[in-house]
Amino acid sequence: MKIELEYHPPTPGMKPPLLARPFADVDYVPPQQEDYQDVVDELVRLSVKLLAHLPDPSLGPDERLERIARVVPTSQLQSANRRSARNKLVALRRRLDELVPGELPAEEKLDLLIARVNELVPGDRPFIAKLETMGDFRATDIGLSPHHWR
């Protein structure tokens, strides 16, 4: 077998070949089941509700939900990195479905978790203080309780 390769390096003034897109722009966008604006609106509503209860600016919505998730003893502590708004909403919904099974909308599931925290730690203290009072005795997704780190 003999393979011959020819290489013609570009020279000054040489025009690169035009790249033709084999598909229309619309073909590159995957079809989505939900309207983008609906996704954004729900993500904003959930994020604002989470922010209102856990105002730490260094936390994202998923991290705020993880803090609230400690009211579900069988849940495991999870962490997440940067994702798109759609992926964040999907993850928030999935996590809320794990924490609160049933056919309720995501916002109502979040309301139930918040109510549970207020039920377990009554009083007028800030929400974050209530969570800190409860502590977090759950196992993590790597098998250790955060109390083992102290």
Image: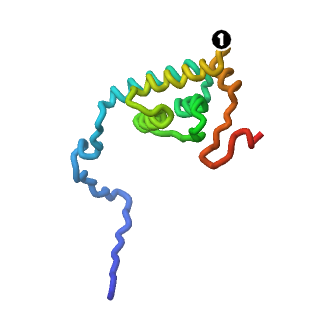
Badge 1: few (under 14), some or many (20 or more) residues near its Cα, within 10 Å? few
**Residue 139 location (% of width, % of height):** 64, 43
Quadrant in which the C terminus appears: top right
Residue 60 picture location, percent across and down: 55, 31
The answer to which quarter of the image holds residue 45 is top left
What coloring was used for the rendering? rainbow
Query: How many numbered marks appear?
Result: 1
Left or right: residue 69 compared with residue 104: right
Residue at 69% x, 42% y is 145
The quadrant holding residue 8 is bottom left
Relative vertical location of residue 2 with respect to residue 24 in this rendering, above or below: below
> Which residue type carries mark 1?
Asp
Q: Residue at x 46, y 26 (%)?
A: 109
Residue found at the far right of this picture = 150
Question: Which residue of the protein is positioned furthest toward the top in this rendering?
Answer: 124
Question: Within the image, what quadrant is residue 70 found in?
Answer: top right
Residue displayed at 33% across by 81% down: 4
| Of the pair 49 and 58, the residue shown nearer to us | 49
For disc 1, the marked residue is: 124
Q: Which quarter of the figure is the N terminus placed in?
A: bottom left
Q: What's the residue at 62%, 24% (across, down)?
A: 56
* Residue 63 appears left or right of 83: right
Q: Is residue 14 above or below residue 97?
A: below
Disc 1 is placed on an element classified as loop
